[in-house]
Image: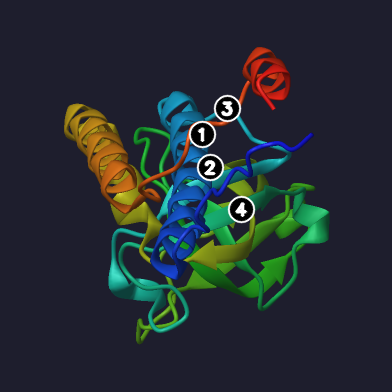
Amino acid sequence: MSEKANNVPEPSSGYRVFSLIKKLFIYLLAIGIIVAAIMFAADHSPNKSFFGYRYYTVLTPSMSPTYKTGDMVFVKLQNASDINVGDVITFNPSSSSDAYLTHRVTQKLENYEGTGVTCFRTKGDANDTEDAMLIDQARVIGSVKFSIPKLGYIVRFVQLRWYLVAALIILLWIFFRLLNMYLAPKGEEKVNTPQETKSADKTE
């Protein structure tokens, strides 16, 4: 009694590389979409934070070369007592504006003029002079812990052109499907089912 061998061709090296790249791309794209969606949802609510962090896009070169225009800084929410000279902080310079600045602390003034309030003097790394206004503790969001270069541009693009991103995702999905069909191993023989195997045994 013998069975017909199933000679399934091994996938080519090009196909294996393509499969690896496709999987990596899909995972990175999924992570990117999730992160962008979270940032998009929280963007218009300054009171929200994600695991104790907020994110801001650098819009001016005042902190160059430490942080450049388009970089995204991640700010840990902190009390004034935890912030020291040399830290880079994000703060709201005016109660009449929703704008935020990210500058370095050059001086910490505790119990400023006997008010019991801690104030900070700040300066942009690229600026020649310190900021004109003192920043009281109520205006401080926290200190910058890390940044991702140019991510702010990407998130901003997703927020303003989300429909283009959706169309791009669809086109990429179609592209990978067609490429998969083209690179998939050809000439695979049909695998025998149990019923076909029994029939072959009877005619042996």
Q: Residue under label 2, please give it.
A: 31
In percent of the image, x 34 and y 73: which residue is there? Answer: 62
Callout 3 amino acid: Asn
Q: CA distance from mark 1 to mark 4?
A: 20 Å
Q: CA distance from mark 1 to mark 3?
A: 20 Å
Callout 4 amino acid: Val
Q: CA distance from mark 4 to mark 3?
A: 13 Å
Which of these two is toward me, 22 or 95?
Answer: 22
Q: Residue under label 4, please give it.
A: 75
Q: Residue under label 3, please give it.
A: 47
Task: State which quadrant residue 177 falls in.
Answer: top left
Residue 50's tag is none
Q: Quick one: label 1 or label 4, which is nearer the N terminus?
A: 1
Q: Quick one: label 3 or label 2, which is nearer the N terminus?
A: 2
* Residue 133 shows in the view: no
Picture quarter with the N terminus: top right
Which of these two is toward me, 115 or 21?
Answer: 21
